[in-house]
Image (cartoon, rainbow, N blue to C red):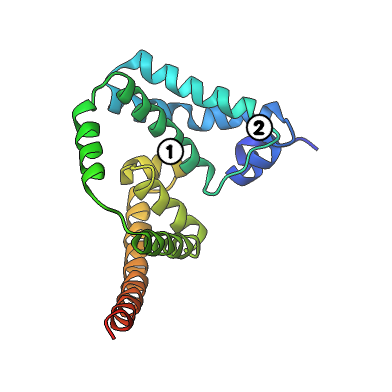
Amino acid sequence: MTINYSQLTDTELVDKLNQYDKRAFEEVYNRYWLALYNHARRMLKNDDEAADLVQDIFSSVLEKMGTLTFHTTLAAYLFQAIRFRIINLFYREQVRHKYLQSMKTYLAQEEVYADQELRTKEMAALIEREIAALPPKMREVFELSRKSYLSSREIADVLQISEATAKKHLVVALRRLRARFTSIVLLHLMASLLWLNRLFQ
């Protein structure tokens, strides 16, 4: 039976990649190379550097065939990977040296309490759980927007949907998450007040 790789979903392609299927890799390459390149070029303002970084991403995917695991979608993973490499490039070239230095100074001056760290981690875990509970396509749109920083137009191009559909998914996702986060924040506030009450009794 002949497989039409262009009709496979990203999840199916990842499964094929983990079976060392080179044609699946070619399909992922053809599906995402241009979108990743355009995204990198807009940030770097340099065609050659953008192409090199995208090639590096796909070389990494090729090396990891057989052991690929994602906590997010393939598209979100690829765009996050390109952003991480761009940030590293900026760092090496000291383009953002002043910003990084100010952050170091701020962190050195701020005392971080263990209880606050724990509550922050708990909050982050709850937020991720709520995002994971979104319908698959809505979650994919949300993660590409908020984690990979793509515009509605870029999301529409990557997912092959209309820009209006991408915007609608994002609006509904934000409405749901805001409602859930409000409840979560109130619960944490109540827990903090109870803790303070016990402390000063």
Q: Bin the neighbour count of mark 1 within 10 Å (Cα to Cα): few under 14, some 14-19, many 20 and up.
A: some
Foreground pick, 33 / 109: 109
Residue kind at label 1, given as amino acid type: Gln
Evaluate whether residue 38 shows in this view.
no
Residue kind at label 2, given as amino acid type: Ala
Compared across the picture, whether 171 is left or right of 25 comes to left
Give residue 153's position: percent from left, percent from top.
32, 42
Pointer 2 residue:
24
Q: Answer above or below: position of 163 versus 124.
A: above
Give the label, 2 or 1, closer to the camera.
1
Q: Answer above or below: position of 196 versus 131.
A: below
Location of residue 197 by image quarter: bottom left
Give residue 151's position: percent from left, percent from top.
31, 43
Location of residue 84 by image quarter: top left
Residue contact at pointers 2 and 1, CB within 8 angstroms: no
Q: Residue furthest bottom?
A: 201
Compare marks 2 and 1 and give the one earlier in the sequence: 2
Compared across the picture, whether 77 is left or right of 114 comes to right
The residue at the point 42 percent across, 59 percent down is: 121
Element at label 1: helix
Give residue 7's position: percent from left, percent from top.
62, 41
Pointer 1 residue:
80
Compared across the picture, whether 5 is left or right of 197 comes to right
Give residue 21's position: percent from left, percent from top.
72, 30
